[in-house]
Amino acid sequence: MAARGVGLLTRLSLCSRRSPAQRPVFRPSSSAGPAAVELRGEEQPPGGEGPGTDDKTPKKRFSEVQKERREQAQRTVLIHCSNKINERKFLNYLSQHGPIKNHFFYESFGLYALVEFCQKDAVDSLWNRSQTPSLSTEAVIPFRSRFFSFKLRNPSGQGSGQPCVKMSNQLPPKSRKLFDILYYAESVDDQLNSLLKEFELTEENTKLRYLTCSLIEDIAAAYFPDCTVRPFGSSVNTFGKLGCDLDMFLDLDGFKTQTTNKNIGNFWMEFQVKSVPSERIATQKILSVIGECLDHFGPGCVGVQKILNARCPLVRFSHQPSGFQCDLTTNNRIALKSSELLYIYGALDSRVRALVFSIRHWARTHSLTSNIPGAWITNFSLTMMVIFFLQRRSPPILPTLDSLKSLAGTEDKCVIEGNNCTFLSDLNKIKPSGNTETLELLLKEFFEYFGNFAFNKNSINIRQGKEQNKPDSSPLYIENPFETSLNISKNVSQGQVQRFVDMARESAWILDQDNRVSSEDRPWGLAALLMPSTNIKSRKRSKSKPASERVRSLLESIKQGNTVVPDSTDGKRTMGTQT
Ligand code: GTP
Ligand code: MG
């Protein structure tokens, strides 16, 4: 069948909401569990969950959020509990050490509790009163951390075998639930916002991420007492979804700062240190030792892999109690700056995150992104494409990086390894966009824009927000915002770009059809785009069949559970091939 050119599509008005007559407006009881609803509304997080949703509250700077979360994590402990736990007795016992600010239970290879005390002293008290276990058959490594086990003296006498505490969910919704939510949504805009709500990191999950970094920092501090382990990437840039990996980096810059401050007067003292021929070798040596340490002493750290020959050397491991797949790097300040930039873009307009989440989900469903490193587009690149697209709207929805740089004050000045990473950090100073386009329109226009983009000759560049000639023949060229001579999508093959273009065109076509044909009883809007590619293709092939037949076959496919997105984590991982 001849490919349908997107340019031929009739432009329909996409701004209208669907009438209630067209679409059932009730929500199935399974669509949002009461526990999930309650937990999400539990408290106001330091960073505010999903900045940009309430335009009136001042938005915190990225650095403020990082600082507050870090301090919160230092007052927090992780406790493995027995299934027979009695919540009241558990909390009573712990409060002997100091008042508890917050706690929640969750399951991940067992039952765990995250407990946040009001003061750090309480953690020290608990630490001092805890003991190293003595096992009868195995020897223990007596490493003491803030990851504890809560033991019952008389387990048989307490409670039933099933945990009777309320659990906080740490996983994304199942396909079926997502399908229901999308099907019963009132409009495409509602669908995109609902997907965001279901997949975005919860307050609890965010706390668990910062706590995990804090626990890893305690381990690294055995060697480097002033180090900091900082999360970056989707865990902190507001584009992370439940189940995404935890990127963290070991920041040893504290040492350098101290040295500079102490160089006063005619004399000074220096530490005796070993030197190695390059920064890269230093990084490899440090990560190698930390990797060994995590492997041998790190409670809950399993499957440690040292990937030291990658362009950006890293240690990858699973942190079993949190359930996170972790990547630990060092010297990665530029990546932290990228996270801050994405945080600002995510906070500037509430449409940004909704669009990015849906497009990432769409890409994962059609295997345009993958868990395995390779020639695929990455989530990071996809996010850059959405930002670029939003800079190209008229009027623009997002400012260019150059304009954020021009707004920067002296306190924002930042140069990392010779790269100018300066941009405004106070997002309250950025004027909101006058653009009022709906998410529905933006979604369709995104597919049209990239379905027709001249990938063969143009590059994508969020610094200037305009298409430019590609400096080399890479099939996809997305300029690294801070290291401007580099292409963040250098790994992407011509075949993958073509698949992306084809899927974008198909999706624009489907959205267009949606507006013409009554979509009663079949996946519509975003749900129709999240059907596996084979279903989309057969839908196109069978478009000459009578509508009733098409509806029947689609319903059949829903019944078989073939619809909507895999439950696995999002496509990822280019740290090894990072450019
Ligand atoms: P997820 O897929 O949800 O994990 O998204 P992510 O943004 O966390 O991506 P990933 O884990 O692959 O990378 C973590 C961070 O590293 C990104 O947010 C970027 O800041 C940075 N990064 C990833 N890939 C590249 C790349 O190819 N080039 C550069 N310069 N930075 C990258
Ligand atoms: Mg990541």
Image: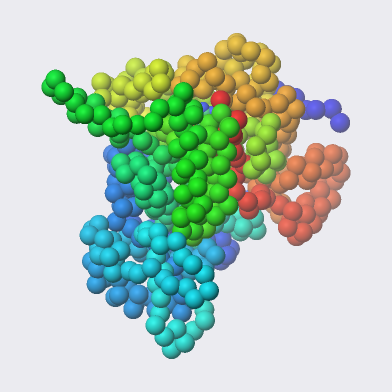
| Residue 469 picture location, percent across and down | 60, 10
Answer above or below: position of 556 versus 251: below
Q: Residue at x 54, y 65 (%)?
A: 109
Q: Residue at x 24, y 72 (%)?
A: 96
Q: Which of these two is toward me, 576 or 62?
A: 576
Residue 356 location, quadrant: top right
Taking the image as shown, residue 317 lies to the left or right of residue 126, namely right
Q: Choose top left, top right, bottom left or bottom right for residue 115.
A: bottom left
Colour option used: rainbow
Q: Is residue 490 left or right of residue 74?
A: right
- In the image, what residue occupies the spot 65% across and 27% down? 491
Above or below residue 556? Residue 248 is above
Q: Residue furthest left?
A: 265
Q: Can you say which quadrant of the picture contains the C terminus?
A: top right
| Residue occupying the far bottom of the picture | 157
Front position in the image: 126 or 473: 126
Which residue is nearer to you in this view: 142 or 68?
142
Image location of residue 359, percent across then percent down:
59, 38
- Residue 493: % across, % down: 71, 26
Camera sees residue 87: yes
**Residue 411 at what x, y percent from top left?**
26, 25
Determine whether, in the image, residue 163 is placed left or right of residue 263.
right
Left or right relative to 252: residue 400? right
- Counting labels gives 0
Q: Tell me the residue at 36%/21% (across/down).
A: 415
User: 466 above or below 230?
Assistant: above
Image quadrant containing the N terminus: top right
Q: Is residue 382 visible?
A: no
